Image (spheres, rainbow, N blue to C red):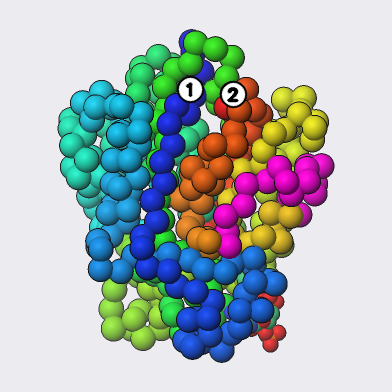
Amino acid sequence: NSKAAITGVYGYVPDYILTNAELEKMVDTSDEWITSRTGIKERHILKGEGLGTSHMAAKAVEGLLAKTGTKPADIELLICATTTPDYVFPSTANLICDMTGIRAVGSFDIQAACSGFLYALTIGSQFIETGKYKKVIVVGADKMSAIVDYTDRTTCVLFGDGAGAVLLEPTPEDNGIIDSIIRSDGSGQNHLVQKAGGSRYPPTHETIDKRWHYVYQDGPSVFKFAVKNMADVSAEIMERNHLKGSDVAWLVPHQANKRIIEATANRMGLGMDRVMLNIHKYGNTTAATIPLCLFDYESQLNKGDNLILAAFGGGFTWGAVYLKW
Ligand code: ACO
């Protein structure tokens, strides 16, 4: 059967820009600290123009349909990776389909924190490879501003809102998604977590007082885990596909921290000129970072380029995808 190729990509970020200078007025931080520790200069925040994650995701999907000349009726499956769904249920994927006129197709959400897009891409590509479907949309979208505590300087400087979407179709050539690794380790659950709001700790005055509805992150523990696992998984997927650093056109890394990205590139033997980087503009948009990178760098991609996509996140979860553009 044919492999699944990404035949279109589109991204959307909301209008409002939250700069480091503005954050300096909100918490005890500095542009110098944020820039040197993370590489982030500004991030976009959804304010006013729409309510939930689905608003941004629907914009990305509408743009994707228009750009690729695809009718909503031709789509057979839509998967949304998100950690900040509009509701606990129905799924954000359901809402996106409703907003974009995609009717009577399978749609569901995948939750794997910052690795969500790679998980969803891996799942979506299976439906193409088996021959079951010919047009699948995979979305990565998050409104992290909904769960970030803007009095906590250790997390509020890191995250932003955004969405990205790709169209997957069978390819008659030798390009497309060639290999994928997805991993998880639940023993990392307490290092990066939004504790309340689910079935274990439903909302009460106590959970609100304890600020359990916000993201909690033990930054240094996550940092160590991320550096090791993102580099390891990238090296593993290169090795098992017999790729040397010089064979890889681009590393497309999850954008959580520029230093983590540099460490991964270094391990892969890649110069930073072959690493997609937009963290300075958007911060960490969780499931949206990788499709937003592909969207921003699309004009620099050539057919047949070898891309390694790599991510890690809460859970812990991590993974890598090898695709030929
Ligand atoms: N401004 C100023 N100082 C700060 C800030 C801030 N915004 N945030 C923390 N600090 C302080 C800390 O309080 C600490 O002070 P102390 O030494 O007096 O206690 C000092 O700066 C150093 O803090 P560290 O945490 O050691 O700094 P570190 O170099 O580890 O950088 C960071 C922190 C950027 C959060 C880093 O740990 C990191 O990037 N971690 C991983 C983040 C990540 O990748 N998350 C996963 C993806 S998210 C997802 O899956 C949803």
Q: Is residue 278 magenta?
A: yes
The relative height of residue 296 versus residue 210 in the rendered view (above or below) is above
Q: Earlier in the sequence, mark 1 or mark 2?
A: 1
Residue at image coords 36%, 60%: 14
Quickly name the residue at label 1. Answer: 4
Q: To which residue does mark 2 refer?
A: 303
Q: Is residue 322 left or right of residue 160?
A: right
- The answer to whether residue 36 is visible is yes
Write down the region rendered in magenta.
Answer: 263-280
Residue shown at the point (44%, 17%) measured from the top left: 170
| Magenta-colored segment: predominant secondary structure | helix
Q: Where in the figure is residue 271, as x and y percent of width and height?
A: 78, 46
Dot 1: element: strand
User: Relative to residue 302, is residue 257 depicted above or below?
Assistant: below
Q: Quadrant of ligand 1?
A: bottom right
Could you say which quadrant of the image residue 203 lies in?
bottom left
Whether residue 168 appears in magenta in the rendering, the answer is no
Q: Is residue 22 left or right of residue 252?
A: left
- Left/right placement of residue 134 relative to residue 307 reads left
Determine whether the residue tagged by mark 2 lies in a helix, strand or loop: loop
Which one is in front, 314 or 155? Answer: 155
Residue 84 image-quadrant placement:
bottom left
Q: Which mark is residue 68?
A: none
**Can you see residue 290?**
no
Residues at marks 1 and 2 touching, judged by CB atoms closer than 8 Å: no
Count of marks, rendered view: 2
Up-down relation of residue 38 to residue 80 (above or below): below
Horizontal side of residue 300 vs 214, given as left or right = right
- Give x and y (percent) for residue 188: 59, 60
1 or 2: mark nearer the eye: 2
Instruction: Give, as a three-letter code, the residue at label 1.
Output: Ala
Residue at image point 30% right, 47% down: 59
